[in-house]
Image (cartoon, rainbow, N blue to C red):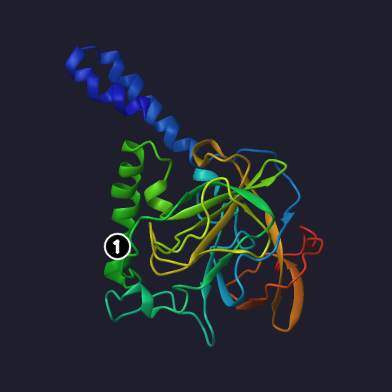
Amino acid sequence: MLGLVLSFIEPLLGIGALGAVGFALIVLGVVLFFVPGGARGRDPVVLRSPVEGRWVPVNSPADKVPSHGTHELGQTYAIDLVHVPSGEWTPMRRWPLAARPDTFPSFGRDVLAPADGVVVRASGRQRDHWSRNSWPGVLYLLVEGMVFRQVLSLLTLSAGRFVVGNSVVLDLGDGVYAVLAHLRRGSLRVRRGDRVLAGDVIAEVGNSGNTSEPHLHFHLMDRPRPLAAAGIPFAFPYTSAGTARTGVPSARRPFTSARDHVPGPPQPASAKQGSL
């Protein structure tokens, strides 16, 4: 932000050095998006699943880290969860070019508190837009998300608010904060200061923010403000291919989770499938 300010005022003041300093700060800011923070090698925090039913993991930290290609906003170990009641999930469609969010199975599904905690931030007024999971839609998504939504978040000093869409941030204690994003407008059942228990319904899956289709974005971070937060690995119990596991689902393999699943110890980090 400081780099942008210096770059803009340099022509007004006629001081060439300001432009050079501003450019250097902008480059540094971009580089920091891809630099991990926090303690490396930290054990995963074991939670309950934030969803129940049959889901497909997308952009899983069990497949790559950082899972979304950036450490920005504390999402080093973030995961996207798409509800698929049966069959396989198709990431891209030829037709229609865009569809209403309520035509997708994920839309309106319950979002659960992954652990006992306190709500430190809750926002739910952004609209649920139509899907962008066709080739033209994806191109629009990239431009909108990487340019317009980022700039709008910057101008409003909201640390990615218009990228994550409607969201809830929970303080789980011990310096761990959970982010549940892309929530349905008007579905939040909690507000700042509320205490929740693991398994409580706190909102519904929506299609707000920078999304291709309705899904839940989930990650842990080490402080409540995502602009300066570092990601924290997590694990939760689930069942995949008939086997009960505790870890992170991966490889877009469908998994199921029930609200009464009791968290167990995470699998060793060396186990690739279903672990960090």
Residue 262, above or below 37: below
Residue highlighted by disc 1: 139
Residue 274 percent across, percent down from the top left: 70, 68
Q: Quadrant of residue 243?
A: bottom right
Is residue 223 rendered to the left or right of residue 146?
A: right
Secondary-structure class at tag 1: helix
Three-letter code, disc 1: Leu
* Residue visible at 39% across and 62% down in the picture: 185
* Residue visible at 53% across and 36% down in the picture: 228
* Residue visible at 30% across and 48% down in the picture: 147
Residue 194 percent across, percent down from the top left: 59, 50
Query: Which part of the image, by quadrant, shows the C terminus?
Result: bottom right
In the depicted view, which residue is nearer to us: 154 or 253?
154
Query: Which part of the image, by quadrant, shows the N terminus?
Result: top left
Q: Does residue 276 appear in the picture of this structure?
A: no
Is residue 14 rendered to the left or right of residue 113?
A: left
User: In this figure, what is the number of numbered marks?
Assistant: 1
Residue 254 percent across, percent down from the top left: 60, 78
Q: Does residue 192 appear in the picture of this structure?
A: yes
- Single out the residue that lies furthest toward the bottom: 87
In the depicted view, which residue is nearer to us: 125 or 40?
125
In the depicted view, which residue is nearer to us: 236 or 77?
236
Residue 249 percent across, percent down from the top left: 65, 69
Residue 159, above or below 146: above
Residue 40, above or below 101: above
In the depicted view, which residue is nearer to us: 49 or 170?
170
Q: Quadrant of residue 99?
A: bottom left
Number of residues whose C-alpha sits closer than 10 Å to that of mark 1, classed few (under 14), some (14–19) or many (20 or more): few
Is residue 241 rendered to the left or right of residue 123?
A: right
Is residue 268 rendered to the left or right of residue 214?
A: right
* Residue visible at 43% across and 74% down in the picture: 91
